[in-house]
Amino acid sequence: MNGGDILSLITVFVLAAFVGFEVIAKVPSTLHTPLMSGTNAIHGVVLVGAMLVLGTASGTSQMVLGFVAVVLATLNVVGGFVVTDRMLEMFKVRKPPKVSAESSAGAPSIEGGPK
Amino acid sequence: MSLGTGIRLSDLIAAICFVLALRGLTGPKTARYGNLLGAGGMTLAIGITFATNGLTHFLLIVGAMVIGIVVAVPAARFVKMTAMPQMVAAFNGVGGGAAALIALATFLRAPAGSLAVYEVVEVLLGVVIGCVSFSGSCIAFAKLQEVMTGRPITYPGQQVWNGIVGVAILGLGIVVCVSSANWLVAIVLVLALAFGVAFVLPVGGADVPVLISLLNSFTGLAVAASGFVLHSVVLVVAGTLVGASGTLLTQMMSRAMGRSLPNILFSAFGSVITATGGAEGNTTRSVRSASAEDVAILLAYANKVIVVPGYGLAVAQAQHTIRELADLLESRGVEVIYAIHPVAGRMPGHMNVLLAEANVPYEQLKEMDEANPEFQSADVALVVGANDVVNPAAKNNPDSPIYGMPILAVDEARNIVFMKRSMRPGFAGIDNDLLFDQKTTLLFGDAKDSLTKVVAAVKAL
């Protein structure tokens, strides 16, 4: 990589840092956890790098490092998005249920919970 | 259009998706859409990588991905809502580990001495930050999963030792830049792992979520560093976005707890049980405990009840039972609202997630600022498994370690009912004078059992 390339990467880095600071100016505390989980999923993009390492690996040690990196990165990206989606499922706008207190009280709970 | 151009274009689209995903995640209405957009951008970025020139070992790549998916999906799908924080810690840790491995592999692959100094620096940043994030997240996971104690672990000269390790990493890093010796990089790697552990040990259980957020932004930076190593724009963009927004989010979280970030990281908060009240006070001062029936009568004939849910409610999985009780009270004409402290549960926003899961109407959930003026007119404040977030010591005892933390003004309600497992102090390890107050009634036991008994008693009235 020549000097021009590293400079353009640094440019990208600095601009992305500004965008990162600006884009989440105000977050209600309700959403702190989902936002953390969502950003956690986004850095799962490291999978792209892990794929490049494994895909160009030669020799056993390189392959092992690359393989482990792909497994770990996949955990990060898949787990991250699924967990975030599960948290946000809870926030979907629902119509207020117009059922009487008795029937809703008798309704089975979603999870059941430990007895 | 050449393949290279295609990859660069799709990297650009993926980067835009990530920015919009972050933006979406900051509003309740757009959050889910934001997350899906992020996943879409991610799929594009990963998919196009398969088309990279000269990429081989496709079977190995797909095989490794399948292993990752087979482990991650069930883990993420079926984990209990209360265990979410440690799940995020785990997924964050492996991301940091992956970033470190990428930087390491690239370093080992290059013929000795062929890397320019700035390239070695990129590698070292990736390895060090990635390793700190990995081992730090492991300890954070262990603390929240209660594999190890949640209390801060301190030893004499802790900060000095941490400082020495930090300086050693820096010094060795400089030597590596000059000599490029593999074994030196190995030592740096081990030191970075040790630093991650040492960094997290003194942080108390209640503060771990803030720490996870910080480690999350570390991983973002490690990913950005590995992007520099691999000359991958999409890694730099996404990693930096997370690094920057994660840092800001960490600050917001610590502000919500009324503490500064250095205070959270270095003060070993909650390691000492404070003398105020003390053990002696516990035995001499009397508390008023009541039966479920007494509590039922108090609640059923109130005009307004404010529920203060805490972590105890979450661990007991009592969110459905509290909703049942609230429905029952409402059918008797009692006004019920929920006052949610920003750090109720184990993470900011955690309690809202749990209550939403139990179908508690959104409009009944009041944030702290909204809820506090309501306590004056409340007949009963029903505190279920919360302690530190209602401790008046935060307002009126400057000696208390939680002094200055914003709390729910439960003490202004006409009656207070605490549902607690025992007299044990909360996460922060501080006695709560409110428990001994004249207008306080205690109902001991598991939150779910207690609530079930109260529900039955209200029905019987």
Image: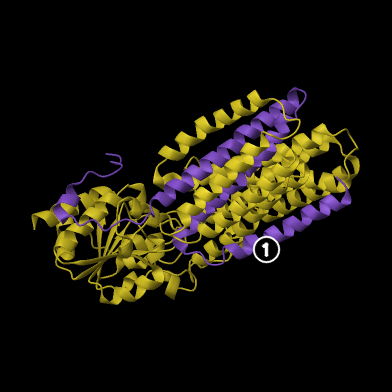
Question: Could you tell me which quadrant the C terminus of chain B lies in?
Answer: bottom left
Residue at the spot x=47%, y=53% of the render? B33
Question: Could you tell me which quadrant the N terminus of chain B lies in?
Answer: top right
Most foreground residue, B315 or B441: B315
Element type where label 1 sits in the image: helix
Position of residue A50 measured from the top left corner of the image (x, y, whole percent): 68, 36
Position of residue A5 measured from the top left corner of the image (x, y, whole percent): 83, 50
Position of residue B25 measured from the top left corner of the image (x, y, whole percent): 51, 57
Amino acid type for the residue under numbered disc 1: Phe
Is residue B139 at all visible to an observer of this figure? no
Task: Please tell me in which quadrant of the rendered image residue B213 appears.
Answer: bottom right
Most foreground residue, A35 or B233: B233
- For mark 1, name the chain: A
Q: Neighbour class for label 1 at 10 Å: few (<14), some, many (≥20)?
A: some
Image position of A105 (left or right of B286): left
Most foreground residue, B48 or B125: B48
Task: Please tell me in which quadrant of the rendered image residue A115 appears.
Answer: top left
Position of residue B26 measured from the top left corner of the image (x, y, whole percent): 51, 61
Residue at the spot x=58%, y=31% of the render? B65
Which residue is disc 1 drawn over?
A18
Outermost residue to the left: B461
Q: Eyeballing the image, is B429 above or below A84?
A: below
Q: Which chain is yellow?
A: B
Is residue A5 at all visible to an observer of this figure? yes
Image position of B326 (left or right of B212): left
Colour chosen for chain A: purple
